[in-house]
Image: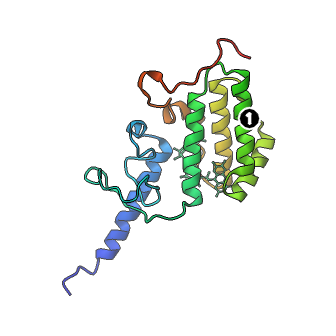
C-alpha cells in the first residue's frame, strides 16, 4: 500500500474549499474579469457550473476546471443562468425605454412566471410578481426592481440579501465592442 491513506480526505477538503471560494466571490461580485471571460460566473469553474462544452480542455492550463459529466442541469444552475440573463438585460435596458420595451419586459416576466422550467420556482415567482409589479420606467428603476425581487427569492431560500446599491458594480453593461450591444431607447419617456 504505497498510497497515502489521507489522500481522499484531503481531496474532499480541497473541493469544498474551491466551492466555498467560488460561491463567496460570486456573491460579493469581486471578480471584474468575469465580464470578458466566457466563464461568466467566477474565476474558477466549479463542479456546480455547467460548461459550454464538457470535453473542452483548451484553458485547463490556466483554470482549475472541475468538469461535470454531461447531463441535465440542476435547479441551481438554471437559476444562476437565468439571473445572469435577467440582470444583464437590466444593465443593458435603455435609460429611456420605449413604450414597446416597457411592455416587452413586463411580458417577459409574466412569461417567466408561467414557463420557467422549474414549476415550484415559476409558481413562487408568480406570487412575487403579484406583490411586486414590474417597474421598468428607466434602466435604474428596472435594475433596482430586479435586485429587489431577486432578494425576495434569496430570502425565501435562506440566502444572503444582496446590497442593491452594488448592482451596477456586479452586473455592468455587456462587454461589447463600441457599445454595439446597446439597446436603443427613445429620446423621451413614452
Ligand atoms: P443566485 O441566486 O443564482 O445568484 C447569482 C448571482 O447573482 C450571485 O452569485 C450574486 O453575485 C448575484 N446576486 C445575488 N442576489 C442578487 C440580487 N438581489 N441582485 C443582483 N445580483 C444578485 N430556487 C429554488 O430552490 N426555489 C425557488 O422557488 C426558486 N425560484 C426562482 C425564481 C426565479 C425567477 C429564478 C431565476 C430562480 C429561482 N430559483 C429558485 C433559483 C435560485 O434563485 C438560485 O438561482 C439558485 O438557488 C442558485 O443560487 P446561487 O446562490 O448560486 O445564486
Q: Position of residue 182 (x, y in %)?
A: 53, 24
Say whether residue 88 is left or right of residue 44: right
Q: Quadrant of the N terminus?
A: bottom left
Say whether residue 161 is left or right of residue 71: right
Quadrant in the rendering for residue 60: bottom left
Residue 70 or 128: which is nearer the viewer? 70
- Examine the rendered structure and indicate whether residue 12 appears above or below residue 42: below
Q: Quadrant of the C terminus?
A: top right
Colour style of the rendered protein structure: rainbow
Q: Residue at x 41, y 57 (%)?
A: 46
Q: Position of residue 176 (x, y in %)?
A: 44, 28
Residue 184 or 44: which is nearer the viewer? 184
> Hey, which residue is sitting farthest right in the picture?
130
Quadrant in the rendering for residue 34: top left
Q: Position of residue 104 (x, y in %)?
A: 71, 32
> Hey, which residue is sitting farthest bottom in the picture?
1
Q: Residue at x 65, y 55 (%)?
A: 157
Residue 135 or 161: which is nearer the viewer? 135
| Label 1 residue near ligand 1, CB within 8 Å | no
Residue 112 or 150: which is nearer the viewer? 112
Q: Position of residue 58 (x, y in %)?
A: 29, 51
Q: Residue at x 54, y 60 (%)?
A: 73
What count of labels does the image hold? 1
Quadrant in the rendering for residue 130: top right
- Examine the rendered structure and indicate whether residue 166 appears above or below residue 189: below
Kindly state the secondary structure of the residue where label 1 is placed.
Answer: helix
Q: Residues within 10 Å of mark 1 (few under 14, many from 20)?
A: some
Q: Which residue is mark 1?
A: 106
Amino acid at each position: 500500500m504505497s498510497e497515502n491513506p489521507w489522500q481522499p480526505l484531503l481531496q474532499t477538503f480541497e473541493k469544498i474549499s474551491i466551492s466555498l471560494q467560488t460561491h463567496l466571490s460570486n456573491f460579493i461580485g469581486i471578480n471584474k474579469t468575469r465580464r470578458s471571460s466566457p466563464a461568466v460566473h467566477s474565476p474558477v469553474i466549479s463542479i456546480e457550473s455547467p460548461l459550454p462544452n464538457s470535453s473542452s480542455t483548451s484553458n485547463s492550463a490556466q483554470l482549475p476546471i472541475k468538469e461535470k459529466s454531461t447531463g441535465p442541469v440542476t435547479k441551481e444552475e438554471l437559476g444562476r443562468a437565468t439571473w445572469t440573463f435577467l440582470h444583464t438585460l437590466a444593465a443593458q435596458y435603455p435609460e429611456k425605454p420605449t413604450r414597446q420595451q416597457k411592455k416587452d419586459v413586463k411580458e417577459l416576466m409574466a412569461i417567466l412566471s408561467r414557463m420557467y422550467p422549474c414549476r415550484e420556482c415559476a409558481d413562487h415567482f408568480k406570487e412575487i410578481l403579484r406583490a411586486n409589479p414590474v417597474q421598468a420606467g428607466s434602466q435604474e428603476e428596472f435594475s433596482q426592481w430586479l435586485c429587489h425581487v431577486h432578494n425576495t427569492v434569496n430570502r425565501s431560500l435562506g440566502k444572503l440579501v444582496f446590497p442593491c446599491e452594488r448592482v451596477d458594480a456586479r452586473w455592468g453593461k455587456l462587454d461589447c465592442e463600441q457599445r454595439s450591444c446597446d439597446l436603443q431607447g427613445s429620446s423621451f419617456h413614452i
